[in-house]
Amino acid sequence: MTSTLLRQWRTRLVPIYPGEGGVVGLCLAVNFFVIAGIMFGRNARDSLFLMYFGVEYLPYMYFANAVVLVVCSLFYTSLVDRIERGKFLAAISLIFITFLIVCRVMLATQARWFYPVLYILTQAIWNFSLLQFWTFLGDLFDTRQAKRLFPLVAVGSLLGMIGMGLTSKPLVGAAGTENILLVWAGLILTATVLGGIVLVKYRSARIQPPSDTASAAPPTRPSEWQKFKEGATRLRDEPLLRNMALITFLLWTVFTVVDFCFNKVMRETYPDKDMLTAFLGSFRGWAGFLCLVIQLFFTSSLISRLGVGTTIGFHPSYLSLSTLWMTLGFGYTSVYAAKMGDHVLLYTVQDSSFQLLYSPVPLERRARIRGFIDGYIKPLSMAAAGGLLLLGTRYLSLRDISAIGLVLALAWTIVAATTKKGYIRALLENLQSDSPALRQAAATALSKLKDPSSLSILSSSLRSESPDR
């Protein structure tokens, strides 16, 4: 009996079928090296920028990050299907490695103008690396495998954060902050080699024989303006999607406000660049460890027991309390607690809950809606936060800026609280869909509603439905 329970628990925790162990293990390792490199590079970039250019210029960088995110996405999607996938991913990685080596050489000149350039370049490498990795995974697994294995492979990112945290202090002490960029280059090279092994060894199984329609002209791709208009129309007509867009906008705005306060306080607390880099590594390593524990042992059970409509409110509720603390008693402890909780909840309960909100969206529209929210709403929120901080740093104290964050977090909490109703109503509408798969998915999701508030909304929605339906 005990062995059966242990086997069932292991299958749930590590849902790998026979023959998948090798490719999953290598993909997890690739994710580990990609994320560890990003975290190392981010720590070095932040430390160098804060020390040698100034925290007062961070709002400009937040705005630049928004632009970089959009440009990277457009550039990547325009090229990724035109070049053989393995060659494209390898070429991009080699370009990144070259950029990082050149950046290290430029840092030796101590040219002040180069620090914002470094900030933007590392942000571009960060964005491209994530796009690369998930494209790489998409080439290896079909839809059924992806649903089962992607959460497991994603654990590699948390392990990468933990590994970075454990090694950051000794590496910075031995090599110095500037040379951490070379560590990042080495990790990219390692991930590229492992990724190449995976593609050569395992991707052939996914290659399909050419069909009779292979010579047909490819379908016309909609323009960015057409995609934007479609996304805006969907948000206007569908309450659930409108709430999801508002959540995304408020989330990243509050995130940026807290991040600015955190960087400001830590820059004053750690006056040496190597000390600051080591601290940032330790901080993000501990955050990764907490993320791993919560994701493995708490997130799924909380969502199952309380419902996605409830857990989507955990993150804004925490930030409402923490920004209130920052407003009443701004200092190291309140800012540290706000940033740590923000980081941990964002990459565990919040992300898992938010992704589940996409489930009522028909599959043929889901990718476009996700692209609209991530490709337009998120950069817009980052740009708005940059503008807000640019004005705030001129006329307001950090305590006042925290108060603005509190107002935004409270607004986010209110929006999150109304999302449950839109989610349930979207599922009910899907029961009348022409798609059997969509009807089945909606029925399954509705059958899993257990918390009293969700059942109450479901009951009232059913009573208000027209009898003809």
Image (cartoon, rainbow, N blue to C red):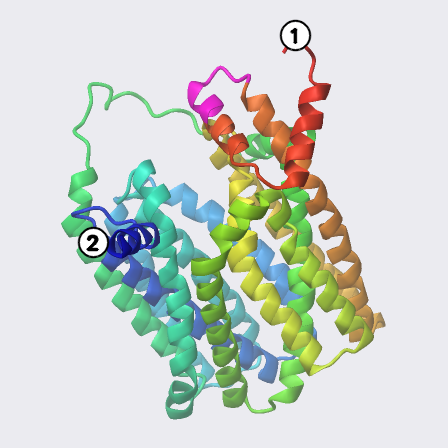
Q: Is residue 452 left or right of residue 156?
A: right
Residue bearing the label numbered 1: 468
Q: Secondary structure at mark 2?
A: helix
Q: Is residue 382 left or right of residue 183?
A: right
Q: What number is the disc on residue 211?
A: none
Point out the residue furthest to the front here: 1
Question: Quick one: label 1 or label 2, which is nearer the N terminus?
Answer: 2
Q: Where is residue 226? Give x, y as percent.
A: 56, 30
Q: Amino acid at mark 1?
A: Asp
Q: Amino acid at mark 2?
A: Gly
Residue bearing the label numbered 2: 21
Q: Is residue 179 left or right of residue 303?
A: left
Q: In this rendering, which labeled residue sits more in front, label 1 or label 2?
A: 1
Q: Say which residue appears at 45% left-offset and 59% top-offset.
A: 297
Q: Where is residue 155? Give x, y as percent.
A: 38, 60
Q: Say which residue appears at 60% left-offset and 51% top-offset.
A: 379
Mark 1 to mark 2: distance in Å?
51 Å
Quadrant housing residue 391: bottom right
Point out the residue furthest to the right here: 395
Quadrant for the C terminus in the image: top right
**Depicted 414 relative to depicted 340: above or below:** above
Q: Where is residue 324? Give x, y as percent.
A: 78, 67
Q: Nearer the viewer, residue 170 or 314?
A: 314
Q: Secondary structure at mark 1?
A: loop
Q: Say which residue appears at 42% left-offset and 82% top-offset.
A: 168
The answer, for residue 370, to whether it is visible in the render is yes
Span of residues in magenta:
432-440
Q: Where is residue 418? Give x, y as percent.
A: 71, 40
**Depicted 316 relative to depicted 439: above or below:** below
Residue 231 is one of the magenta-drawn residues:
no
